[in-house]
Image (cartoon, rainbow, N blue to C red):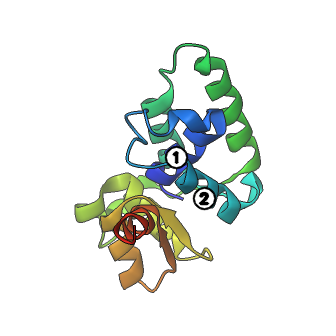
Amino acid sequence: MDTNALILLVVGLIDKSLISSHKRTSIFESIDFENLAFLIGDLEKVVTTPNVLTEVDNLLNNFQRGHRWAYYQVIRELIAKSTEKFLESKKMMDSNAFFELGLTDSGVLEICKECDFLITGDSRLSDYANAYGIKVIDLKKIRNERLTSL
């Protein structure tokens, strides 16, 4: 799971009503979170990297108005239950995708070569994963298809 998908998951677990107003998830709706949560089923099925968790924490650890404690509870549970896979930065920078995707997403791409599928909110990462034959669930693509079918 990439940073964008994990951010949607965390914000939704804190409070679904925040999804449409939080600057990191405002393109999504509650139904996107609900679909993501249904797809995952259990936090123990989430596979992530230290880089993704660091990005999520850097982007979300500034909650206020009573959501700060909820954030810490959710992120702690996520870290405790998920599987965290580590790749050395040296290995990621040698990947073909590093120049286009950067350190975190090239690491996600490498890890996902050994997973059932990738859940992402990043179209560029989705395109690379598809090119490698990785099954992709692109949250933005699903959202856009839903909106265009209205």
- Image quarter in which the C terminus is found: bottom left
Badge 1 density bin: few <14, some 14–19, many ≥20, Cα 10 Å:
many
Q: Residue at x 45, y 86 (%)?
A: 133
Give the labeled residue for mark 2.
Answer: 36
Return the x and y of residue 110 as percentages of the image width and height.
47, 69
Element on which disc 2 rests: helix
Element on which disc 1 rests: helix
The reply to whether residue 47 is visible in this rendering is no
Disc on the earlier residue, 2 or 1: 1
Return the x and y of residue 101 as percentages of the image width and height.
30, 61
The image shows residue 33, relative to residue 11, as above or below, that is: below
Q: Residue at x 43, y 62 (%)?
A: 143
Q: Residue at x 59, y 41 (%)?
A: 12
- Image quarter in which the N terminus is found: bottom right
Give the labeled residue for mark 1.
Answer: 8
The image shows residue 121, relative to residue 133, as above or below, that is: above
Identify the image quadrant of residue 73. Answer: top right
Q: CA distance from mark 2 to mark 1?
A: 8 Å
Kind of residue indicated by mark 2: Leu
The image shows residue 126, relative to residue 28, as above or below, that is: below
Residue 41 got which mark? Answer: none
Comparing 6 with 110, the one in front is 6
Kind of residue indicated by mark 1: Leu
Asked if labels 1 and 2 touch by Cβ distance under 8 angstroms, the answer is yes
